[in-house]
Image: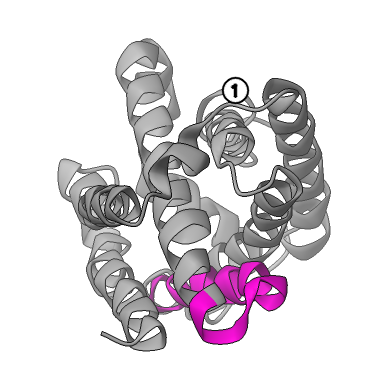
Amino acid sequence: MRPLILSILVVLIVSIPGFFGWQIQRAGTPAFWALVVTPTLLLAVFAAVRAQRHEELREWIRPRWGDATVGVLSGVVLVAVAYYFTRIVTPVGGPREVWLARLYLQIGDLSWLRQHTGAVAALVITASIAEELVWRGLVTTLLAEQWGSRTAWIASAFFYAAAHLPAAWALSDPRAGVNLLLPIGALGAGLVWGAVVRMKGGSLVAAMIAHALFDWCMVVMFPLWGTGL
């Protein structure tokens, strides 16, 4: 199968279930998590098997010197950028505050998540590893075959954002319109994580650390809505 077609299929496999998962009737339910996370987990298995066959998996998951430092620093920078971005784009009391509210309504009760930190941490780490295997691993490799490695990591971020576009409609609100937070966030984070992987010579470990730290902060430690921040 052509690399570009396979990359588009990845976007569809993630985005179509995601559209249904992000609808308000599934807010805070196991169905939300299943629809949003499961397709990526399955694709991650495919990505790992394919990479092993092409003798790429070892390079993807082999730790490099400085992975922890780069991962933590880039994760912290993304958290800071997300905080200031949402303060500007979705200010408290503004019409687009509902964009942020809908995201956290969908995730569920924050107090419950904090009472079950072990399970939430396991889910965050697993999902972060899976997303990096799929987007910075599989899709970036496929796009490199199509367009070359210099542009593949940038194109991969746009594919990653495209996979979140249907969710923007699922999260839309009559007052604030289509909720663009997820695709914009995916594009920005995808560019950062793609740059980290490129800087680390193709290793995904630092990006996995950054991704997990960012998700953990956004979901549990420093949620951007509902805490008075």
Amino acid, disc 1: Met
Residue 159 lies, with reference to residue 182, above or below; the image says below
Q: Position of residue 169 (x, y in %)?
A: 42, 79
Looking at the rendered structure, the secondary structure element under dot 1 is: helix
Instruction: Reply yes or no: does residue 164 show up in magenta.
Output: yes
Q: Nearer the viewer, residue 36 or 84?
A: 36
* Residue bearing mark 1: 221
What sort of colour scheme is used for the picture? one colour
Q: Identify the residue shown where x is 47% and y is 48%.
A: 132
Residue 158 lies, with reference to residue 147, above or below; the image says above
Q: Position of residue 49 (x, y in %)?
A: 24, 50
Location of the N terminus (image quadrant): bottom left
Question: Can residue 20 be seen in this snapshot?
Answer: yes
Type of secondary structure dominating the magenta stretch: helix
Q: Nearer the viewer, residue 42 or 90?
A: 42
What's the magenta region?
Answer: 145-167
Is residue 92 left or right of 138 when viewed as pictured?
Answer: right
Q: Position of residue 189 (x, y in %)?
A: 66, 55
Q: Position of residue 50 (x, y in %)?
A: 28, 57
